[in-house]
Every structure is written in C-alpha cells, then in structure tokens.
Amino acid sequence: MRAVIVDCAIYRAGRRTEGPGDLSEALDAARAAGDAFIWIGMHEPAADEFDLVSREFGLHPLAVEDALRAHQRPKLEVYDDSLFVVLKPVVYEAESDTVSAGELMVFIGDSFVVTVRHGEGAPLADVRARLESDPEVLAHGPTAVLYAISDAVVDHYIDVAGELQVDLEEMEAEVFAPTGGGASGTSGPPTAERIYRFKRQVLEFRRATGPLAGPMARLASPGVPFVHERSQPFFRDVSDHLTRANEQVEGLDRLLSDILAAHLAQQGVRQNDDMRKISAWAAMAAVPTMVAGIYGMNFDHMPELHWVGGYPMVLGLMAGTVYGLHRLFKRRGWL
C-alpha cells in the first residue's frame, strides 16, 4: 500500500518531538502549549484518506476539494479556521526540453500545517530537514513552514529559468549559424516546430510563476490571518525573487518569439533563393528549347535550311546565349 502520509511530527519550541498518536488530542495539546504545532505531509491522498485530517483540523470543504482534485492555479484563500495556499513547483527535463508542473497545497491554521503534494516534483523532505536544523526559525510555527516552502519553490523557479536560458541561447546560435547547420552535438538545425514546442514549455512555466505574484504580495502585506506579522519582510524577499523569475520568463518568451520570427524569415529568404535559382536555370533552358523548336518545324521553305554552316552556328548561338545568361545570373547572385 502506498504511503499517503509522507511525514508527520509535532514541533515544540522549534524542535521535533514524537509523532502524534491521536490527531485531535495532539492538536489540543499543541494549542495548549502555545509554542507547538503539528506538521502533516501527504502525497496525493484520496478523499477517504484525507477525510480524517480535514475533520480534525476543521479544513474548509472547498479547500479540501481543491486539494484533492488538484489542477489549480497558484492562489491564496483565507477561511475561518485556516489559510489555504496553492503553489506549482516545476521540473525541467533538459534532454527533452520539457517543463512539468506539480502542485503543492499548504493549509496553515492555529497550531497546524498540512501539506498536500501532487506529482513527483518538489518533495518537501529537504525543506523539512533544513527547518529542523534551524530551531530558531522553526520556532515561529506554521508561518515559518509556509515561508520555507514558498522560498524553496520560488528559488527553484530561478534555477529552471537559468537552465532554459542556456538551452535557448544554444538554439539561438543554431538559428543564426552561418552554415545553417546545427551546433556541435545537436541533431540538426532547429525547425519552426521545435522552436514552437520550446515556446509551449516556457508558457507552461509562465502559468506556474505568473499567478503566484498576487498571493506572495498579499502574504508580504499586513492583515493576513495565521501569518506572523514579523514574517512580512521574509515574504517580501520571496516576492522579490518571484518578480525576478517572472521577468526572466517574460524575457525567454520574447526572445523565443524573436527567434521564431528570424527562423521564418530565414526560411523565406532561402525559398526566394531557391526560386531565383530555378527561374535562372529555366531561363537558360528556354533559349535552346526555343531555337531548337523553331528549327525543328518541318517547313519546305526555311531560311538557311540548306546552309552547311547553319547547324553549328545555331548550336554556337544557343551555347553563347546560355553562357551569357549564366554569367548575368551569377553576377546578380541568382546562382
């Protein structure tokens, strides 16, 4: 049977203690202590598996529905007994140029944190370990957990944007390579389809980062329930990093549009060159065809019909005309 609850612990004064035996009693004890809270981490729970947690912590039914069904935009919602935040961590596969987005739901309330993760990206084990190694930060309770998770997700946005930038610069070099061939180690020059697929991945990335700006700005402002007032500067820092990530994503999207336009323009120029070459060769072929066609008509009375030098003269005329056209087209760059 798969492990739905990835980790569960009670934290007192910033230090991990034993896991809760009974959620209701543990939550009451944590609230009574004043400096303790419960953190439960879950991975893709089913409705019946999440039912106990939602009932014990008084989670709002609409937020529970969102957490179970997933496919949500990044958002922040405030309910009577909890705060609900949706984040979309992203993973970039450089070999396939694929950006995949998971979903991470965070409930925080009075002395509790519940995290629900969908997808394989952005596991929270590292975040939990980092917090447990810094009791002073963890002592700030559920707000510290929300900050650490948000900070980790947004910092990874910047890393992914950097990886995309490197691959995009390589693609740009291929497009503008003088020989028109692919760069070393590539399978060939980028096509419009490949550039467009890359643009779709950047759009997927943008869907994760863009809508998160509003919730982060709100968390950095006063008056948000269940968020410690002293945490506002930290959330402002996360918001600044998110702004940087969004600017990078917008820059990637603009550059991709320019690369696609340049690639299509190059294709148009190449097609014009091909048409000029075809037209030049057709013009050169038309001259001997025309002369041979005239002399191939079966007339009884035809100028120079019985002239001995007529045949070599006509061949010379055709060859000279074709040679002259070839020189002309070559000088104009058609050939």
Image (cartoon, rainbow, N blue to C red):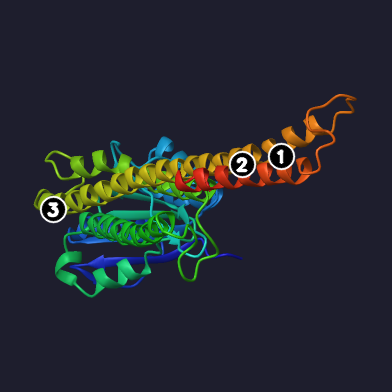
Judging by the rendered image, the residue that carries numbered circle 3 is: 231
Residue shown at the point (73%, 34%) measured from the top left: 291
Graded by Cα atoms within 10 Å as few (under 14), some (14 to 19) or many (20 or more), the crowding at tag 3 reads some
The local secondary structure at tag 3 comes to helix
Instruction: Select label 1 or label 3 by which is in front.
Output: 1
Q: Are marks 1 and 3 in contact (CB under 8 Å)?
A: no
Residue type of the residue flagged with mark 1: Pro
Badge 2 or badge 1: first in the primary sequence: 1
* Local crowd size for mark 2, using a 10 Å CA cut-off: few (<14), some (14–19), many (≥20): some
User: Which amino acid, by three-letter code, is at mark 3?
Assistant: Ser
Residue under label 2, please give it.
321
**Sequence-first disc among 1 and 3:** 3
Q: Secondary structure at mark 1?
A: helix
Mark 2 lies on a secondary structure that is: helix
- Disc 2, disc 1: CB below 8 Å? yes
- Residue 187 at what x, y percent from top left? 55, 64
Whether tag 2 and tag 3 are in contact, CB under 8 A, the answer is: no
For discs 2 and 3, the disc positioned in front in the rendered view: 2
Task: Look at label 2 and name its amino acid.
Answer: Thr
Q: Residue at x 24, y 47 (%)?
A: 247
